[in-house]
Image (tube, coloured by chain):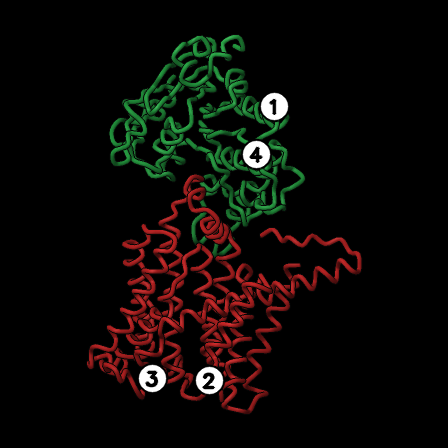
Amino acid sequence: MALLEIQGLTKKFGGLTAVNNFDMVVEKGEIAGLIGPNGAGKTTVFNTISGIFKPSSGKVLFKGQDITGFSPHNVVRMGLVRTFQITTVFSDLSVLENIRLGSHLLAKLSFWDDLLTTPYQRRKEKELFAKAATLAEFLGLGDKTNELAKNLSHGHQRALEFAIALASDPEMVLLDEPVAGMSSEETQEMMRIIRATRDRGVTVLLVEHDMKMVMNICTNLYVLNFGNKLAEGNPQQICANESVISAYLGSEYKPKC
Amino acid sequence: MKSLKFLLFSALVILLFLIPVFVDNLYWISVFTKWWIYILLTVSFWLIMSTGQVNLAHAGFAAIGGYISGALVQSYGWNSWAALPVGVLTAGLIALVLGYITLRITGIYFIIMSVALAGFIQTIFGIWDHPFGGLVGLQSLPHPDAFLGINLSSRPALYYLILICMLLVVILVYRIYYSSMGRIFRGINSSDRLAEHVGIDIMKYKVMVFVIGCLCAGLGGVLFTYYTSTIVPTSFTLTQSTYYIVYCAVGGLLVFPGPIIGTLVLCYISELIKAYAEYQNIIFSVLLIAAMLLFKGGLYGLYQRFINWISHVTKRNETPVKSI
């Protein structure tokens, strides 16, 4: 079943066409990849899906519903979350509070619930902080729950970002360069976590430059170049695709597939 | 730990209530009354600022509360207890309308909007002779009418009325800041982009906190008219709003006692240097810069660091980071 569908997506910034007539389908349960050189328009696609930009034309469908132009908090409401290319966490809050905020939509607390500390509020806070602690553990942050996010190392901040995204119990996550700046151990760990996330029923679409990781983990790939779709297919097909090789992978890559 | 805090707070409140009993000096009772108004205004300003919005029109909203209720009483003969809610709600309504229109703009633009608004409010109340008294403002405003039979015309009575209002606002702000709402505000302040991507409707929360803060400011303005019996266009200026920033910064920006401590300390200093009032702005500016550069976290931060140092020195294991 197609969970995320993009039809004819075009985004122009004045005279610059960042994304041109892009089509993509991500099936439920997949780990799909969106790759291409820098400036190809990958993050713009993400930004259009998550509601930061409204597309110049085209549609975004999630679970069969048209979410084109939805503001970010409404996209998250549908069950679709994303992470950012530049590490984005709530720097002045602790790890636990960060993840707890990720569960914002699960709390459904009213103003009066908070003001009067109703039993419902107390129960929900306890429940969601416990959930946050579990997610922290899952992402390797179990011993740092009270640490302020800004004091974490880059790798841990990346992990925290992912924890925040998972905290809303999403159906799908868009990961923008999840292993950027990570060592190979950290990358292996992140891959393990991404697979575990998929196994728990969350569909993944990621943007990455680490080809070893991408070819290893993705079931389906889309290649963007200068805003246009260059190719789509499974890793073997993409690896062997001549235009992808010349535009992005490089001719030394073919034997590595 | 929680019951200790509650006990301390109760003890403090009892102390505050006993001040007029032990302090005979009407002048000082007046000064304290003024300080309670400032605390009310500063903590409500601080609450709005917790989302990253610096409301330099905060004093202006106090002016709205004071002018509307004052005009209703003086020019239209209203009972002060009917005029008070109207003054407060007018401030809130204006905040609601303006909030929805302008809060789509984030970051530094909010502060610019508030500067423009502050100037606008100050000017507009100076234009009409009726009912706002033009440039002369409203003079000889009466004492608040009796409340449930209690006469409110004496200085001590006003002290108690204003103290109670201040405590209500302080408790309200405390409850909000340390709830999941406060966490949402701090999240919005940290990264509003991320906040909207965890499903937080940032517009809703920014407008909400702006309205709550401005309602409190309106109340502060009404209480001000009870305290001074006058209100003029220059009572609540942009400069006044900048004082709230200084109080918060000097006291400590990120924890609750901060704005209260800062207000008390700086109001006391202001009282001490009354004879040299022209130097107040210079002294405040120096203290603000010192707070930003030297003692980050304000006076309360210094106190916390001192406590940490003591427990470190006595080799007790305490985690300095409090999770809220």
**Judging from the image, what secondary structure is the residue with disc 3 in?**
loop
> Contact (CB < 8 A) between labels 3 and 2?
no
Disc nearer the start of the sequence (1/4) = 4
What's the CA distance linking mark 3 and mark 2? Answer: 21 Å
Where residue A251 is drawn, which disc sits there? none
Q: Compute the Cα span from label 3 to label 1.
A: 70 Å
Chain of the residue where label 1 is placed in the rendered structure: A
Which chain is displayed in red in the rendered image? Answer: B
Could you tell me which chain the residue with mark 4 belongs to? A
What is the spatial separation of the Cα atoms under label 2 and label 4, in whole angstroms?
A: 54 Å
For disc 2, the neighbor class at 10 Å (few under 14, some 14 to 19, many from 20) is few
Q: CB atoms at circles 3 and 1 under 8 Å apart? A: no
Q: Amino acid at mark 3?
A: Thr
For badge 4, the amino acid type reads Ala
Closest to the camera, between mark 3 and mark 4, is 4
Mark identifier at residue A159: 4
**Do the residues marked 3 and 1 share a common chain?**
no
Say which colour chain A has.
green
| Mark 1 or mark 4, whichever is nearer to me | 1
